Image: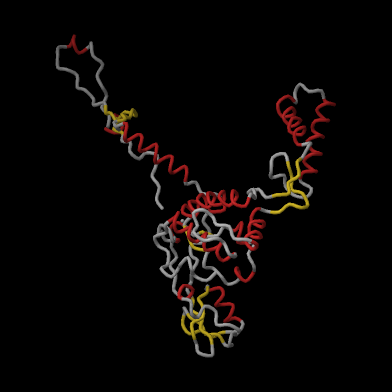
Amino acid sequence: MTQGTSSDADGQQGFEETDQPKEAPKADQQEEQDFIPLEDTDDSEAESDIEIDLSTPSDRRGARRRRAQQQQRKVPKHCCKSNSKVYDNISVYAPPDSNLIFRCSQKRANWYLSRNLARSLSPTSIHLNFAPAGQGHVNDPYYLEERENKCVVCGQMTEEVGATMLHVVPEQYRKWFPIRLKSHSSHDILVACPECNADWDREAAIVRKEIVKLYKIPLEGVGWIKDQDAGAAKRSAGAVAKKQNVIPAERLQFLERNVYDWWVKAHKNTTADNAGAYKGPDYKEHGELVVAQVWKEAKPLTPAREGWRDVSEFIRTWRKEFLDRIRPEHLSPEWKVDNPV
């Protein structure tokens, strides 16, 4: 299921040359006529725009390396920042023993209060007016602790950099889990800054490639139908774009119609995501097929030491990969690989 960067000018220093005005030498009248007197200017006008690069080759290599790292940390759209605050840490108590059963957002607490389902104990706590069917997370220290609104990886506060929800188990697989594993379960959904979320996204892509090799299920899924007309439509579109000024009107109309007819067919059911193919009626996503295989058999994901006996082992494998690859420094000590799923 957020981190500082360096600027392009790191490692490079520039000094500006300054043309200091020179005084005309004192001489007789005839010698003074051979010189053009300089006008008085202030220091800002006398400065030259020429910069002298005094950085060493090692400095320039370091700057290029930092620029490359900055480019690699480009944040995908789905990792862009959203809220600046995620946790309100409202404590919820419930009868019969008035135990703390979970923490919730201010919005959810207001929902209970507005329907007279709870009474307020303090600005940060409420007590339910009914006995719930279950006791929530009453014995789970991870779900009952107060959480800070900061990136679990680098520790930057979300009010400064924004908050994104990092999925330790990628949503590509999580959405196919049984409802009981997704309902009221946020153990593997963490708060991170956009940059750290993007870092995990790249690391998770490496793990997904291992899963592709393991199960022989391509990332684009299965059930694509090869479009025999895609090549002809592509050639027609190229001719229209490059040579429409010299193509006869009748021929141009034929080519444009060819492209349009292909587009309508390719987009009738789904979008033509795969080059030269479109999703057929039997199309299935990569994540759906992998989760189905996890239920059937145990296959270890190298270098995992245990096989996936069920989807729980699959989830714990992702947790371990997250810890090993990202090494979050501000993750709660109660967050553990072996916690219940």
Quick one: 319 or 47, which is closer to the camera? 319
Residue at far bottom of view: 96
- Image quarter in which the C terminus is found: bottom right
- Image quarter in which the N terminus is found: bottom right
Residue 337 placement, left or right of 314: left
Quick one: 191 or 231, which is closer to the camera? 231
Quick one: 84 or 190, which is closer to the camera? 190
Residue at far top of view: 30
| Image quadrant where residue 329 sits | bottom left
| Image quadrant where residue 260 sits | top right
Residue 46: x and y, percent?
29, 29
- In the rendered view, would you say 52 is above or below 290? above
Residue at far right of view: 250
- Residue shown at the point (83%, 30%) measured from the top left: 254
Q: How is the image coloured?
A: secondary structure
- In the rendered view, would you say 331 is above or below 141? above
Residue 290 placement, left or right of 55: right
Residue 229 placement, left or right of 148: right
The number of discs equals 0
Residue 255: x and y, percent?
80, 30
Residue 266: x and y, percent?
77, 43
Residue 10 placement, left or right of 196: left
Residue 323: x and y, percent?
45, 59
